[in-house]
Image: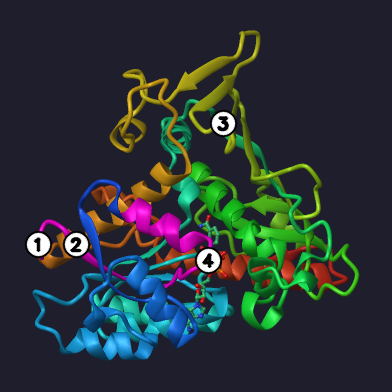
Amino acid sequence: MSDVLKMGMVGGGRGAFIGQVHRTAACLDGKVRMVAGCLSSTADKAIASGKDWGLADSRNYQTWEAMLEGEKKLPASERIDFVSIVTPNHVHFPVAHAFASAGFNVVCDKPLVHTGEQARQLIEATKKMGVVFAVTYNYSGYPMVKQAREMIVNGELGEIRKVVVEYNQGWLANNLEASGQKQANWRTDPKRSGAGGAIGDIGSHCEQLVSYVTGLRLQSICADLTSFVPGRQLDDDANVLLRFCKAGASNCEGTGPDSMDAEPGARGILTVSQICIGHENDLRLRVHGTKGTLGWLQEEPNYLVLRQDGQPEKVYRRGNGYLGERARGNTRLPSGHPEAFFEAFATVYSNACAAMRARSEGKGNVGGIGMGGAGGGFDYPDVVDGARGVEFIERVVEASASSEKWVRFAGK
Ligand SMILES: NC(=O)c1ccc[n+]([C@@H]2O[C@H](COP(=O)([O-])OP(=O)(O)OC[C@H]3O[C@@H](n4cnc5c(N)ncnc54)[C@H](O)[C@@H]3O)[C@@H](O)[C@H]2O)c1
């Protein structure tokens, strides 16, 4: 594997949203080059989009199936090192499964797939082929989110008692999908989006952010999903109560309400909405421990606020020497020059690419956070994290429809 990795992309053609962010982020450090793609669902648009990006005709494919076959036929030194999947959700599974099963590393956007069974199959293919499989939960790429994680691991917050995570957007407050707006259209269609609306689209980010920062494991869920916009088939507003396993408890597998309460762990509130008029990408996290509270806002991502009893609040700022190793090691600019969305995305890529290089050198566990590779330095969300996100969406949908107060979360 050469020092500059070769990337292929599925999705992200003309008029698409996140594909351009992925291309920019992947290439930000000069260590990745996009050499192949099938950038759109329609052949003409795929070819036109590939030309915009300067793809060679021979590697500008009309379908992702042709791309897989074409790349497999190339000598190992020429074919792509990884595929990046930036299509609507329903296309993630067939593409990710086919490429992983053929031995290609995969980067896939969230939510990973539609069902727990599909997620299980992706984990199986990933392990069988020993590929690197990253899921772009980009918020865990922010330096100050990494700082929060490190401070909690170091015990600076004490025992975690309560977590509050919110993601408020307003762009679907009206029936935007009826206008044919592309991104609204598929996100509100269960066949393409999956069982979750807002809870899948942005709730999945919240679940991963909480898991990454606190390390807490979900025990059970009480949920209320609503579709406020008439005729909309999926939720556009979600309010979820969370119970976490007791920190350090060996067994989080109780069978009923009594065993749930036997060892009370942390509690949480997760609220996401796409009908909050005036809110853009208002993702905010608060973690309350026995020694203090940490707060982080996505729209002001270079700061992390620590509140302690009887003291003025303390603001940690990105780019400073007093920060922990993870925050310092995953940043690019000096303090005061704001870093944000592109850089955090680029960090997910650079850490996944480090694992890909290690894989090509025959190193052991190159899995990311979910597969325990983060301890070895591979601090990227992986297929196990993606699968937990899928299970989270399924359980929230189940809990909202259930007359039982609490629905168990079996994920680890
Ligand atoms: N991590 C994040 O912050 C973030 C932000 C936005 C979107 N996303 C995720 O990224 C994915 C794409 O979202 P988007 O908003 O960019 O969607 P989009 O509708 O803007 O773009 C999707 C692209 O995929 C293409 N496509 C569809 N089917 C295809 C196929 N079979 N072969 C090749 N290309 C195909 C479309 O033509 C289009 O170019 C979704 O899974 C979404 O949840 C993640």
Tell me, yes or no, whether the two marked residues, 1 and 2, touch with CB atoms within 8 Å.
Answer: yes
Where is residue 178 shown, x and y percent of the image?
80, 72
Of residues 184 and 110, the one nearer the viewer is 184
Let me know if residue 364 appears in the view: no
Question: How far is mark 4 from mark 2, CA to CA?
Answer: 24 Å
Relative vertical location of residue 85 with respect to residue 298 in this rendering, above or below: below
Amino acid residing under circle 4: Ala
**Tags 1 and 4 in contact by the CB under 8 Å rule?**
no
Left or right side of 267 for 4: left
Badge 1 or badge 4: first in the primary sequence: 1
Mark 3 = which residue? 300
Q: Looking at the image, do the residues carrying marks 4 and 2 touch, with CB atoms under 8 Å apart?
A: no
Q: Pointer 4: what residue?
A: 16
| Dot 2 alpha-carbon crowd within 10 angstroms: few under 14, some 14 to 19, many 20 or more | many
Q: Foreground residue, 408 or 13?
A: 13
Magenta span includes 22: yes
Residue named by callout 2: 5
Q: Is residue 283 visible?
A: yes
Question: Residue 386 at what x, y percent from top left?
Answer: 48, 66
